Image (spheres, helix red, strand yellow):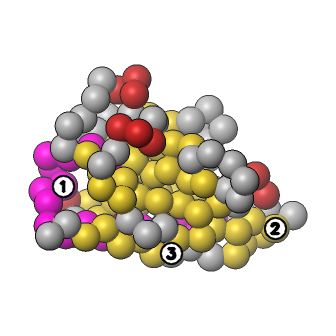
Amino acid sequence: QVQIVESGGDSVESGGSLRISCIITGLTVGSHCFGWVRQAPGKEREGVAAIGFVGGTSYADSVTGRFTIYKVKTKNTLYLQMNDLEPEDTAMYYCAATAQCPWSDRWLLPKEYHLWGQGTQVTVSS
């Protein structure tokens, strides 16, 4: 049974940093693509970062240069390092996975992912 559990969400001030993580069990990290998807109240889900089989990455324009996605296979864990946080980054952040990895230009589309965690809340105050 696949389990995806996010943690690390917190309340921080604008300009601060936070690292959220996602422990994955029941599947092989090296054979899946992963993404971080966020959803703010009243807004649609938005893919912010994704990583492919061999480590290629993709970022939304709004977080490029501030967020870094990476995975540690030996720990079956996915991370999202977030720097220079802005109030607009406030959202529930979800870790998502798929074994049917699409072409990289679709990695940020939430509909491409089939396995989801419960989310971790990130709140950035001005």
Q: Quadrant of the C terminus?
A: bottom right
Of marks 1 and 3, which one's residue comes earlier in the chain?
Answer: 3
The amino acid pointed to by label 1 is Val
At x 65%, y 60%, the residue is 91
Q: Secondary structure at mark 3?
A: loop
Q: Secondary structure at mark 1?
A: helix
Q: Quadrant of the N terminus?
A: bottom left
Callout 3 crowding tier (Cα within 10 Å): few <14, some 14–19, many ≥20: some
Of marks 3 and 2, which one's residue comes earlier in the chain?
Answer: 3
At x 39%, y 48%, the residue is 35
Q: Residue 15: where, in percent of width, then height?
A: 76, 60
What residue is shown with label 3?
8
What residue is shown with label 1?
29
Q: In the rendered structure, which segment of residues is drawn in magenta?
A: 17-34
Q: Quadrant of residue 84?
A: bottom right
What residue is shown with label 2?
125
Please say whether residue 63 is one of the residues in the magenta stretch: no
